[in-house]
Image (cartoon, rainbow, N blue to C red):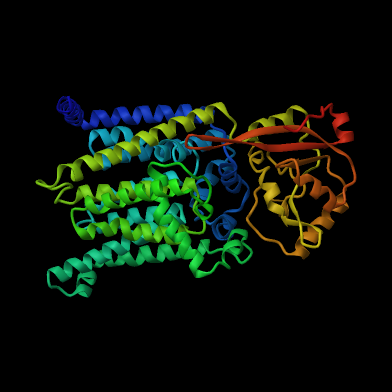
Amino acid sequence: MNSLTDNLFARIYRKYNSLDRRAVSIAVIIIYCLILIAGFIFHEQTPDEAKAWIIGRDASIRDIIFYIPRYEGHPPFWHLLLAIPAKLGMDYELSLCIIQFIGAGLLVTAFEFLTPFNNLARTFIPFTYYFMFRWGIYQRPYVLLALGLILASYAYGKRKTKPLLFIGALAFICIWSMYGVAMAGGITIAWIIEIIADSIKEKQNPLSAIFKDIPRLIGFVVLLLFALAIIRLVLPAADNYTYTAVKSREVLPYLGHVLKVILFVPAESFVTAFKDGPILYFDYSPLELVICIFCTFVFYFMVFLLAPKKITTLYFVVPFLCLAGVSADYFYQHHFGTVVFLAIFYFAVCMREKEGVGLNGQNKIIYKLLPAVAVGAFCVMGIYWSFMSLLGDALYDSSCGKKLSSWIKENGLEELTMDCAWYTDIDKNGKLVVTYPEIGIYSFVIEAPYFEKNQVRNAIDGTTYNLTMTYSDEKINALLDEIRKEGSPDLIYAFNDQVEQGYLKNVGIEDEYVPVYSSIEVTLFKDKQSFFLGGIMYARSDIAEKYGLETIAIP
């Protein structure tokens, strides 16, 4: 029976992989694009997606290039790309979907026609979680980062004859994320080590091996200068909230965070879904710990097992270590796709080596069955997560931007004054303090694209977008004084049912406010949906009566 099953699966495997590769790829691209379109119909932009659009629409080109990256932590190119349709006045949702559709369409096309994988891999990998949903449906720059890694895997095979093609692909990776800069830097280091190792093997002077190819040398220099320029643009400002929150950490805790990335992220990227949020705060039960580490080491075993040459492993090890070093303090689950596409890049590189993958005469179970089972598990889990996330995106609201903006317009509230409640806290002396003004305003950024002008009266510096900026007590008090002079707002928008109380006391507002609108939203993570109380709109009592706004019970 087992022999019959083995033979049956083997025949199916061989037959499917013998089908015309072009026909299979075209079918996959069509199905992928149709799912994208269906996903876009139901998808509502989250705050991160909305904020990028608002920056592109309302920030000056100078600020997008030289000022905002110091707070956003990303190179400016995604915001510059979005600025084209945004500043031309194109529809917010439609133009974002078009840009993402082009990026994801190019990604799946490049994967299908520029990678050396067999038909089964080409058929199923595009529908896994990060490929299909998290980096396909979500309108973020990571889809273009993934495209860069696919292009680099293709250009790798031509690195000796056309080195500038490979260098150009690495530069493209740098454009979209600091994670891309880290990975491109690691790949370049691995390449240089390979050049030196080959020259030593051939009993040549390593320096002459590097300097004899002038175009390649110039490419290395230009790539280095380009990466340094991007790093300079993104270096955190001294008052960057994210930077000040982590810069005081000591070396040993930081190394512990790097170790978390190395031990847990590969498993969580490919087959497990234990934790969501930042890697910094991952805390596993003993069983989760064992499963995660086991899956991670199976992956590492495959990295070394399938390398046709020992030095080829550097094309994963070095960029992954660079990625771990950069990401240790700020690495969320939606960033883990970097590891998935770095792995796709690496295994494509292995298959492009002339020696091939899986040498004849080697143990069949280790060299064929184990990789097949591992890739199968990745595809099964990835497709399941993708399906559940697409379903959740269709059934639930991941943000309330469109609904709230429609509610405001339907009730004729656009011209009323509106504040966003700032996050507040109680210090050790019992004093009410504002901890971070912009966090409260961040909750309204999802509505901003639906209005031509800023709706929030207490927005910092009058911007429709928020920056992760810390504020001195003097700055906060000055802002509060300005708000007090303007009197009580007509509306107050809060992210939950508690922060507005502290805000009212801090600003010195004594008028009565009643809740008139609320939303229940969901955070989607693989096959999990986390529901939470989203935005709440409060109206001053006289405004509620004037506009016929009914008081609601907060869920």
> In front here: 360 or 327?
360
Q: Identify the residue at horizontal 40%, vertical 30% (top origin).
A: 33
Above or below: residue 350 compared with residue 14 = below
Above or below: residue 371 compared with residue 403 = below
- Along the horizontal axis of the image, is 253 left or right of 540? left
Above or below: residue 522 compared with residue 505 = above
> In front here: 370 or 316?
370
> Can you tell which quarter of the image residue 418 is in?
top right
- Along the horizontal axis of the image, is 172 left or right of 246? left
Residue positioned most to the left = 361
Image quadrant occupied by the N terminus: top left
Above or below: residue 212 compared with residue 539 = below
**x, y (%) of residue 244?**
61, 64
- Along the horizontal axis of the image, is 466 left or right of 420? left
**x, y (%) of residue 45?**
57, 37
Image quadrant occupied by the C terminus: top right
- Confirm whether residue 100 shows in the render: yes
> Can you tell which quarter of the image residue 20 is in?
top left
> Can you tell which quarter of the image residue 552 is in?
top right
**x, y (%) of residue 496?**
71, 41
- Confirm whether residue 174 shows in the render: no
> In front here: 336 or 258?
258
- Along the horizontal axis of the image, is 445 left or right of 546? left
Q: Identify the residue at horizontal 14%, vertical 51% (top origin).
A: 355
**x, y (%) of residue 92?**
58, 36
